[in-house]
Image (cartoon, grey):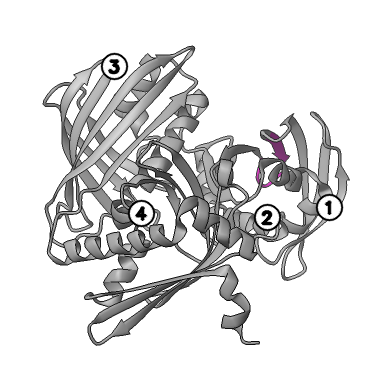
Amino acid sequence: MDRATDTADREIVLSRSFAAPRELVFAVWTDPQHVGNWWGPAGFTTTIHTMDVRPGGMWTYTMHGPDGTDYENWVRYLVVDRPSRLVYDHGGAGATADISFQVTVDFTATPDGTTVTMRSLFPTAAMRDLVVQRYGAIEGGRQHLARLGEHVAAVQAGAPLRGHARFTRRFAAPRRMVFAAWTDPAHLVHWWGPHGFTSPQCIFEARVGGRIRIDMRAPDGGVYPMIGEVRVCEPDRRLVFVAYPEDGQGVRQFEVVNSIDFADDGAGTVITVDTQVTALTTAQVPLEGMQIGWNQSVARLEDLLHDPEAIRHPGRDIVTVRLVHAARSRVFAAWTDPEQLRRWWGPAGFSNTFHVFDLRPGGDWRFTMHGPDGTGYPNHCVFAAIRPDEQLVIDHIGEMHAFEILASFLDCAGGTLVRFRMRFDDAAECAKVRTYAEPANEENLDRLEAVLGLR
């Protein structure tokens, strides 16, 4: 029995051809700013939370149905072969948490353009039939590809790409403090921009007609200015400003209007952010990652508001954030079970020998890390605070580098958001360590995912 016959009752296969080059069609399928304009059946809209298009990367998003129903989704990319193929695992949350399947999308170049073939393979025929009968998966898939075709045609015709994002966040901080964090340059410099970015120049005149200029420096050293003007400034209530992000050569990329409303919520504050791209100022500029950038910026703001020490003493933290596709209790266990922890702690190529592991406030953790060259590195840590499934605080004691580790675990669509922060006694010490600690921490979390069976 061949593969096609063996899996036919578990598959949904849909195909459509487009009069467009394969590179463009692939980009429209994988660029978050494009995806937000067409993804899903007719009448649906999509909010993208994270989108990391690489093998092992996660995409989490919410589809909003015409009747107001929200459908949480997660994707883990297995194969990313630009511009010819994508393979990914796809699942849901809440009412659809038990539904998962694997998707293969082939982008085939043809004399007239591109043919897209989307194959969804389910674990069982019963699950395949369920999504067809209950959710109209076949007709929904056809509408999905039709909307893709409409968007590709619009892009080819030069239609403006109208990027839009709207989201809410709650902060355990008073409204005045949250508003100040948005309008005081002394605070903005600590959180504006995606992870790893800094703001060497920050001007924000919090008044109607006030000038804005924020120069964002990327981890690779590139500087990307954003200039703008304040249109509405109602202290502690509402802020509206227009911004013009520029590329590395000072060319304006697009115009975006940002509206932020601030409301009391018990002892905290809820903000509603609405950001709308109103014009492209340079033709064919991909508006990549606008919503993802916002999510990362607001996550940095949340850290700042929950940790005033970071405002008083900036530059002392190294922060790594990762969405791990596993339940929070399972992820927390991998951090606190010594048999699991020793298998993944440290950068790629390292191993561990644990001598003492006393998991309690005040308990010692003594271990030796063995480098790829056989060198042993003794470590001594003390558990300072433990909140099961939520947070670990660990003091790393050492002659070379002393720092505090704070690991937090948050429920998120598609898994657990892990925030791993190292805090040093002074900024100079942190700067010396940062160049190798940041990539090492990423490798550390890669190994965590491997132990959890996610790689």
**Are the residues tagged 1 and 3 within 8 Å (C-beta)?**
no
**Which element type, helix, strand or loop, lies under badge 1?**
helix
Q: Nearer the viewer, mark 4 or mark 3?
A: 4
Q: Nearer the viewer, residue 171 or 371?
A: 171
What is the quadrant of residue 263 in the picture? Answer: top left
- Of mark 2 and mark 4, the one earlier in the sequence is 4
Instruction: Give the image location of residue 184, x and y in percent.
Output: 30, 25
- Of mark 1 and mark 3, the one earlier in the sequence is 3
In the rendered view, would you say 95 is above or below 19?
A: above
Residues shaded magenta? 392-402
Q: Nearer the viewer, mark 2 or mark 4?
A: 4
Q: Which residue is mark 1?
A: 339
Q: Nearer the viewer, residue 233 or 142?
A: 142
Q: Which residue is mark 3?
A: 237
- Of mark 1 and mark 2, the one earlier in the sequence is 1
Label 2 crowd (10 A; few <14 / some 14-19 / many >=20): many
What whole-number distance in Å separates the C-alpha atoms at marks 1 and 3? 51 Å
What whole-number distance in Å separates the C-alpha atoms at marks 1 and 2? 12 Å
Q: Nearer the viewer, mark 1 or mark 3?
A: 3
Instruction: Give the image location of residue 34, x and y in percent.
Output: 29, 57
**Which element type, helix, strand or loop, lies under badge 2?**
helix
Q: Nearer the viewer, residue 131 or 169?
A: 131
